[in-house]
Image (tube, rainbow, N blue to C red):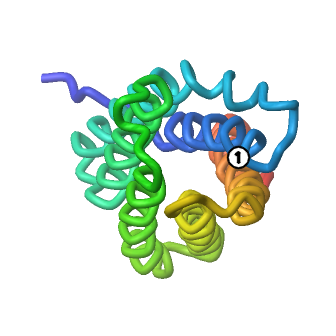
């Protein structure tokens, strides 16, 4: 019987996460006159949400519990963000802060795991945790706009690192050697 080989879905997951996070973070940082926030709505559902959930399932099939958990969790995160952005009934003051606080705890746990997986993933999850903490505080209670802006800038750095890891993985695979460290 022929062996079915599943391509590595991690670069797709990192790309989906990085692009979606960059859009929302740029809006949080106050760039583009708010256009980033509008641009992220569909992206949060389809690219950040559904694509990441599918990547998580593929990682389960490949036997990778950590990446399966990460991508499935953040697929659900982005679908939840989409729901929050598009349904006014759930937008009670502080509700986004609570949501982000709980996800910052999940991200913290993932960071503890990533410490063993290398410096780049360690930094990615540390930055992600910091981003989520800043955004949680920024959206807590009446809100703290300066913390949302700081979270936006930190999120853009996090997204850039995720996109670098996408490029590194794809370029090194295509070239068959280590082109990007």
Q: Nearer the viewer, residue 3 or 38?
A: 38
Q: Nearer the viewer, residue 131 or 56?
A: 131
Q: Is residue 170 above or below residue 118?
A: above
- Residue 83, given in percent of the width and then of the height, sits at 39, 29
Q: Is residue 100 above or below residue 14?
A: below
The residue positioned 79% from the left and 51% from the top of the image is 179
10 Å neighbourhood of mark 1: few (<14), some, or many (≥20)? many
Q: Residue furthest right?
A: 32
Q: Is residue 114 above or below residue 176?
A: below
Q: Is residue 178 visible?
A: no
Q: Residue furthest left?
A: 1
When asked about the image quadrant of residue 54, the answer is top left
- Residue 145, given in percent of the width and then of the height, sits at 72, 58
When asked about the image quadrant of residue 174, the answer is top right
Q: Is residue 66 visible?
A: yes
The reply, left or right, for residue 95 in relation to residue 136 is left
Quadrant where the N terminus lies? top left
The reply, left or right, for residue 6 in relation to residue 38 is left
Q: How many marks?
A: 1
Q: Nearer the viewer, residue 161 or 90?
A: 90
The reply, left or right, for residue 153 in relation to residue 147 is right
The reply, left or right, for residue 32 in relation to residue 14 is right
- Residue 60, given in percent of the width and then of the height, sits at 24, 45
Q: Nearer the viewer, residue 169 or 106?
A: 106
The residue positioned 23% from the left and 51% from the top of the image is 63
Quadrant where the C terminus lies? bottom right
The residue positioned 51% from the left and 63% from the top of the image is 140
Q: Secondary structure at mark 1?
A: helix
- Residue 10, given in percent of the width and then of the height, sits at 48, 43
Label 1: which residue?
25
When asked about the image quadrant of residue 17, the answer is top right
């Amino acid at each position: 019987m022929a062996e079915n080989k599943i391509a590595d879905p991690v670069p797709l997951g990192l790309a989906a996460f990085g692009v979606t996070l960059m859009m929302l973070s740029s809006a949080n940082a106050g760039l583009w006159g708010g256009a980033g926030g509008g641009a992220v709505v569909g992206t949060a559902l389809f690219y950040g949400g559904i694509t990441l959930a599918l990547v998580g399932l593929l990682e389960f099939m490949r036997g990778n519990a950590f990446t399966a958990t990460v991508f499935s969790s953040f697929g659900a995160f982005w679908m939840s963000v989409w729901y929050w952005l598009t349904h006014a009934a759930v937008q009670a003051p502080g509700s986004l802060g609570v949501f982000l606080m709980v996800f910052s705890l999940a991200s913290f746990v993932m960071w503890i795991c990533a410490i063993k997986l290398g410096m780049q993933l360690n930094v990615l999850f540390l930055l992600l945790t910091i981003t989520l903490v800043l955004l949680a505080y920024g959206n807590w209670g009446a809100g703290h706009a300066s913390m949302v802006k700081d979270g936006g800038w930190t999120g853009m750095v996090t997204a850039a690192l995720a996109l670098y890891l996408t490029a590194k993985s794809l370029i090194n695979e295509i070239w068959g050697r280590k082109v990007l460290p």
